[in-house]
């Protein structure tokens, strides 16, 4: 999951599911030549999100059983997601504390690789007999600015449109709805406002309180459906003055000014994501929601159970702005298992990564955490598909996905995006004014030499 997505699910208290990692390829350690060696594994942990620790414990047990004399030293960081990244950075700056193996958010891979904290692992996976199960598209979030691979993916997430079929039926709209462009989303919301006035027609996340939820589930789901992007990966420059940026903000203006979106007291509430998933959607108070692939898993848990969700909720792909090719868009995040640059035995560390993330380990991680599978042999696995009825839909839209620009500057730019959306939905600025303010902020963050004008 992406950073905010994982944190949100953790807050909702997902129950643990046992994980089992299979043994990986045998190497010199298995024959005893690594006697007495130890590898430190660092990962994120909270009391309400124990799945990763369960996974690591099983991987440790299996790895140690096949690599005699090697000790896996699990060192969890008990903190929220943001604090985890801060503490991990401090550990990586110390040779004595830097871990050998790191549970790494794709959000951080590019910047951590550029900082020299991660080791490229291309040479260690190229001959791995399971590496062919990872399509090229699934590894983009694990690559640095140099194009090298810095981790093996656990899984990913995608985003789409949830809609309440019962409300759609009341409004005279099709229950197999699939909008072809932005106008059709707004048109459906207008119809719902007219025909079913006691519900919120649609939700698209906005404002600074929403953090990355606003940037990723909201604004970027629009922007990456235009002809423009935030960042030019060919020139390694940020883009300013794009029409797509203004058009995305105009969508916000339309939705909020016409009363199609939540009122500002709801939209700008820090807990809006939790309210959407546990209150507004389950209680039939929201008709359309642009959101992440993890919501059905929330509804399947005892503490947030919504047994009727399959009969109530329809799923639709997010269309591009005008229906232009490829027709749909989505955003992905996720986590990878990386090798620390200061490890004394990179081959042994890489072998732990392969042991942990072979088919069985990856399958059970995906089921336990509601991650969208990236391995080809898991996407079609009956056990995986049976575990969550929404898996097939969300795995099927990975082909349309985009990743955020995971540069060291992105967190500040993401905040800049959130500010732009908030200024529009509160009517403080027009889309044009907010886009201009964003461009001015971009210069302050990255400098003019790292910016290019949109074509």
Image (tube, rainbow, N blue to C red):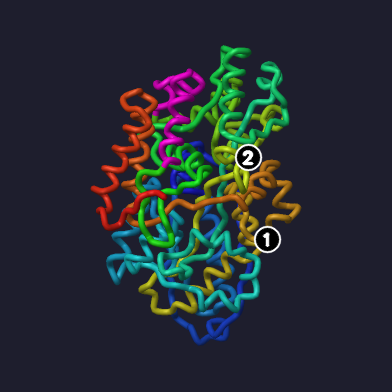
Query: Is residue 301 in sight in this rendering?
Result: no
User: Please, is residue 77 above or below residue 274 in the view?
Assistant: below
Magenta residues, start to end:
243-269
Percent position of residue 244, x then y: 45, 41
Q: Indicate yes or no whether the magenta region holds residue 395.
A: no
Q: Indicate yes or no whether the magenta region holds residue 260.
A: yes
Crowding at dot 2, Cα within 10 Å, few <14 / some 14-19 / many 20+, comes out as many
Percent position of residue 237, x then y: 36, 57
Quarter where residue 343 is shown: bottom left
Which residue is identified by label 2? 317
Is residue 134 toward the left or the right of residue 141 in the image? right
Percent position of residue 69, x then y: 50, 79
Furthest residue to the front? 455
Foreground disc of the pair 2, 1 = 2
**Residue 228, disc:** none
Query: Is residue 288 in sight in this rendering?
Result: yes
Q: Please, what secondary structure does the residue beneath circle 1 have?
A: helix
Crowding at dot 1, Cα within 10 Å, few <14 / some 14-19 / many 20+, comes out as some
Residue at image point 67% right, 49% down: 396
**Residue 376, disc:** 1
Quarter where residue 281 is shown: top right
Residue at image point 55% right, 40% down: 292
Q: Please, what secondary structure does the residue beneath circle 2 have?
A: loop
Residue at image point 48% right, 25% down: 255
User: Please, is residue 197 above or below residue 298 in the view?
Assistant: above
Decide whether the magenta segment is chiefly helix, strand or loop: helix
Front residue of 92 and 70: 92
Sequence-earlier tag: 2 or 1: 2
Asked whether the beta carbons under mark 2 and mark 1 sit within 8 Å of each other, the answer is no
Label 2 to label 1, Cα distance in Å?
21 Å
């Amino acid at each position: 999951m992406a950073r905010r997505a994982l944190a949100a699910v953790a807050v909702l208290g997902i129950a643990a599911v046992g994980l089992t990692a299979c043994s990986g390829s045998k190497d010199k350690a298995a024959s005893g030549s690594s006697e007495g060696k130890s590898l430190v594994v660092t990962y994120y942990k909270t009391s309400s999100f124990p799945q990763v620790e369960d996974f690591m414990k099983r991987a440790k047990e299996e790895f140690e059983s096949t690599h005699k004399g090697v000790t896996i030293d699990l060192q969890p960081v008990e903190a929220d997601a943001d604090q985890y990244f801060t503490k991990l950075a401090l550990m990586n700056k110390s040779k004595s504390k830097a871990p050998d193996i790191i549970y790494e958010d794709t959000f951080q891979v590019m910047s951590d690789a550029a900082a020299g904290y991660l080791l490229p692992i291309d040479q260690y996976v190229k001959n791995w007999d399971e590496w062919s199960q990872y399509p090229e598209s699934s590894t983009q979030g694990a690559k640095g600015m140099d194009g090298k691979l810095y981790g093996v993916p656990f899984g990913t997430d995608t985003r789409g449109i949830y809609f309440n079929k019962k409300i759609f039926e009341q409004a005279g709209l099709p229950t197999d709805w699939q909008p072809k462009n932005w106008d059709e989303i707004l048109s459906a919301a207008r119809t719902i406002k007219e025909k079913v006035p006691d519900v919120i027609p649609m939700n698209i996340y906005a404002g600074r309180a929403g953090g990355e939820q606003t940037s990723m589930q909201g604004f970027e789901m629009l922007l990456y459906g235009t002809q423009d992007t935030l960042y030019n990966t060919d020139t390694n420059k940020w883009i300013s003055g794009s029409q797509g940026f203004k058009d995305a903000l105009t969508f916000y203006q339309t939705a909020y000014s016409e009363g199609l979106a939540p009122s500002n007291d709801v939209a700008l509430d820090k807990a809006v994501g939790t309210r959407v998933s546990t209150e507004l959607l389950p209680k039939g108070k929201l008709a359309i929601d642009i959101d992440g692939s993890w919501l059905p898993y929330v509804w399947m848990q005892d503490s947030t159970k919504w047994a009727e969700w399959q009969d109530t909720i329809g799923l639709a792909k997010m269309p591009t702005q005008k229906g232009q090719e490829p027709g749909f868009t989505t955003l992905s995040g996720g986590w990878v298992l990386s090798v620390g640059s200061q490890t004394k035995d990179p081959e042994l560390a890489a072998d732990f990564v392969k042991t942990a993330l072979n088919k069985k380990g990856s399958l059970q991680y995906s089921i336990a955490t509601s991650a969208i599978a990236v391995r080809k042999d898991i996407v079609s696995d009956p056990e995986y598909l049976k575990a969550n009825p929404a898996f097939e839909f969300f795995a099927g839209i990975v082909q349309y996905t985009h990743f955020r620009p995971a540069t060291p500057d992105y967190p500040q730019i993401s905040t800049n995006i959130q500010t732009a959306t908030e200024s529009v939905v509160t009517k403080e600025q027009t889309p044009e004014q907010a886009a201009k303010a964003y461009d001015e902020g971009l210069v302050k963050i990255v400098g003019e030499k790292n910016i290019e004008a949109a074509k």
